[in-house]
Amino acid sequence: MTITHLVTHSGGFHADELLSSVILTRLFPQAELKRTRDKQWLAPAVDKIIYDVGGDYNAEAQIFDHHQRPSPLREDGQPFSSFGLIWAHFGRDYLVAMGVPEQDVEAIHSAFDTKFVLPIDLLDNGAMEPSVAGPLSSLTLPSLLGSLKPVFDDASPTADDDAFLAALSIARGFIEAFIRNFAAKARAQGIVLESIAKAGTSPILELPMGMPYLSVLDKAEAGHILFVVNPRGGDWTLNGIKLSNDTFDQRADLPADWAGLSDAALEDACGVKGAKFCHNARFIAVANSREAILKMADLAVKALQ
């Protein structure tokens, strides 16, 4: 199909139609983005996609609103915003356009929906209060995007549209970064699994480079692994493993007598030539060679016994 216009409402904007616009402008780069409430523009047509306005949800007619009653719901009863509707129908094509390998599209589509799209849907529909973020509520993505609206006394007749277009590029950066990270995690999974198998029963996991590994360790039920080593630039790092992404607590800390030391002081404390640094919080140490970092890793394991 040839889409010539992407139509959403004029005036003030919210995260859901802004993020929807990121998806649609990527898939239909030649289409004109039209912000209006003119009823003629809101009439469905084969060359238009209408979203967050129009009072209907009809995928065949290419209209994706959620403000009408009854409003569209997910299979589990949670509400859609226009972003959720656009992601459900166009998200897979967007991932392909982003270069995500075919075998990873479904998993990344689902993960992005859960972690990024659903919270936007819930906040937009009032199904989740911003206060759940506590003191960070003003720093949630919808709040940050909302802060890009024009100030109340901006008298420019194009103020809203200008702000929307400026915010669009920022919103695009967030979505694309999330997708790149999900794709990177998918690429890393095979490498980490291979390294886990190579480590066997050792509590030390060696990776060929820095990469996401925590979720793979959990899936592989590799609870015996306590530390991860990998090269970083010209150095090597020894890392503790967080219990989850929601805490700083680790499976095991580096030795207390290394904390906050560097260079000669750290070499004296651990007895390893080439030891360079240990963070005061004991979650990372650095050495100048693989040999040195593996010696430090062995010492860290022995210190726990």
Image (cartoon, helix red, strand yellow):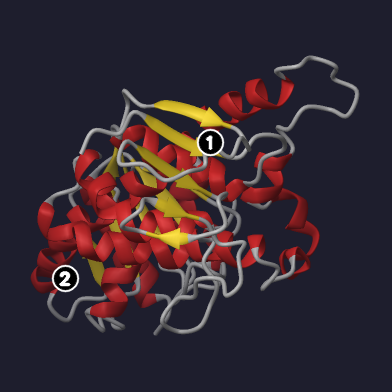
Q: Residues within 10 Å of mark 2 (few under 14, many from 20)?
A: many
Q: Amino acid at mark 2?
A: Ile
Please identify the residue farthest to the right as the structure is shown: 153
Say whether residue 213 is visible: no
Q: Which mark is residue 237?
A: none
Quadrant of the frame with the N terminus: top left
Q: Marks 1/2: CA distance?
A: 60 Å
Residue 123 pos. (x, y %): 65, 63
Q: Is residue 28 above or below residue 20?
A: above
Residue 80 pos. (x, y %): 51, 66
Q: Is residue 241 left or right of residue 259?
A: left
Q: Secondary structure at mark 1?
A: loop
* Residue at numbered disc 2: 196
Q: At x 28% / y 60%, what residue is drawn?
A: 108
Q: Is residue 150 left or right of residue 117?
A: right
Q: Residues at badges 1 and 2 in contact (C-beta under 8 Å)?
A: no
* Residue at numbered disc 1: 40
Say whether residue 81 is visible: yes
Q: Is residue 222 above or below residue 102?
A: below
Q: Secondary structure at mark 2?
A: helix
Q: At x 31% / y 32%, what residue is drawn?
A: 28
Q: Is residue 150 above or below residue 300?
A: above
Q: Earlier in the sequence, mark 1 or mark 2?
A: 1
Q: Nearer the viewer, residue 283 or 185?
A: 185
Q: At x 31% / y 57%, what residue is drawn?
A: 60
- Count of numbered circles on the image: 2
Quadrant of the frame with the C terminus: bottom left
Q: Amino acid at mark 1?
A: Gln
Q: Residues within 10 Å of mark 1 (few under 14, many from 20)?
A: few
Q: Of tags 1 and 2, which is closer to the observer?
A: 1
